[in-house]
């Protein structure tokens, strides 16, 4: 099994943690995994891109252009910005809730979220769209978007893990005080109804 997964979002969405959960879950199944990140002004809402490569010890940490099996877009514009990494048969999982970049709000540039979503729908790739804001509201906090997105990815067969395997990783690698919340978030993602 070889899977190249790219996660793209902005600072504060838990992109890097999600990539580490994916990698640790693979390692827990005795499958080789490595990650790398590109973080730009992450604490200030800048772009964050994490690469997760599973099942191939002879690959570089970064996914080459046109080689990703899956892009998990925590923010729609970031999903578009990284589309060049997706292989022709690759798949998309996208949170439809935009985060307006600081540059757009300062410069008076309109952020056309509907146009971005429409563009993603017409790429020719299988795409699953999630109303992350609604699902986070069900969890009671926006801080668990990353775990919710992992739950959706598992349900949709985009990641080769069970809900129980990911939950085991969370229990082993995250503070116990967040276990109940993360379990709820994973279940919310796993039981979501497609938004678009």
Image (cartoon, rainbow, N blue to C red):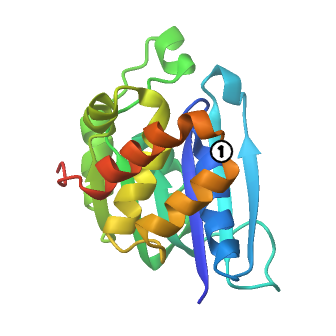
Residue 10 image point, x, y percent: 57, 35
Residue 51 image point, x, y percent: 67, 61
- Left or right: 117, with 50 as reference point: left
Residue 42 location, quadrant: top right
Residue 184 image point, x, y percent: 37, 43
Q: Nearer the viewer, residue 29 or 133?
A: 29
Residue 74 in view of the camera:
no
- Left or right: 160, with 111 as reference point: right
* Element type where label 1 sits in the image: loop
Please name the residue shown 35% across and 58% down the image: 152
Please name the residue shown 34% across and 71% down the image: 125
- Left or right: 89, with 130 as reference point: right
In the orientation shown, which residue stands out farthest toward the bottom? 1
Tell me: residue 89, above or below residue 142: below
Please name the residue shown 26% across and 61% down the image: 122
Residue 162 in view of the camera:
yes
Residue 120 image point, x, y percent: 32, 55
Q: How many marks?
A: 1
Tell me: residue 119, above or below residue 89: above
Please tell me how crowded label 1 is: few (under 14), some (14-19), or many (20+) other residues with Cα within 10 Å.
few
Tell me: residue 111, above or below residue 170: above
Pick the quarter of the image with the N terminus: bottom right
Please name the residue shown 39% across and 57% down the image: 151
Q: Which residue is mark 1?
A: 174
């Amino acid at each position: 099994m070889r899977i190249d997964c790219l996660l793209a979002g902005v600072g504060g969405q838990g992109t890097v943690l999600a990539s580490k959960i994916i990698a640790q879950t693979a390692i827990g199944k005795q499958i080789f995994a490595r990650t790398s990140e590109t973080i730009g002004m992450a604490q200030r809402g800048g772009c964050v891109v994490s690469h997760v490569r599973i099942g191939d010890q002879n690959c570089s940490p970064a996914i080459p252009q046109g080689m990703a099996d899956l892009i998990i877009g925590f923010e729609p514009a970031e999903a578009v910005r990284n589309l060049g990494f997706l292989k022709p048969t690759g798949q998309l999982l996208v949170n439809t809730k935009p985060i307006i970049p600081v540059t757009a709000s300062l410069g008076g540039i309109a952020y056309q979220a509907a146009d971005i979503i429409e563009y993603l729908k017409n790429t020719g790739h299988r795409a699953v769209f999630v109303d992350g804001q609604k699902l986070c509201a069900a969890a009671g906090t926006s801080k668990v978007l990353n775990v919710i997105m992992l739950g959706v990815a598992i349900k949709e067969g985009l990641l080769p893990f069970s809900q129980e395997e990911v939950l085991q990783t969370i229990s082993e690698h995250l503070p116990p005080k967040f276990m109940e919340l993360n379990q709820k978030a994973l279940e919310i993602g796993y039981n979501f109804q497609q938004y678009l």
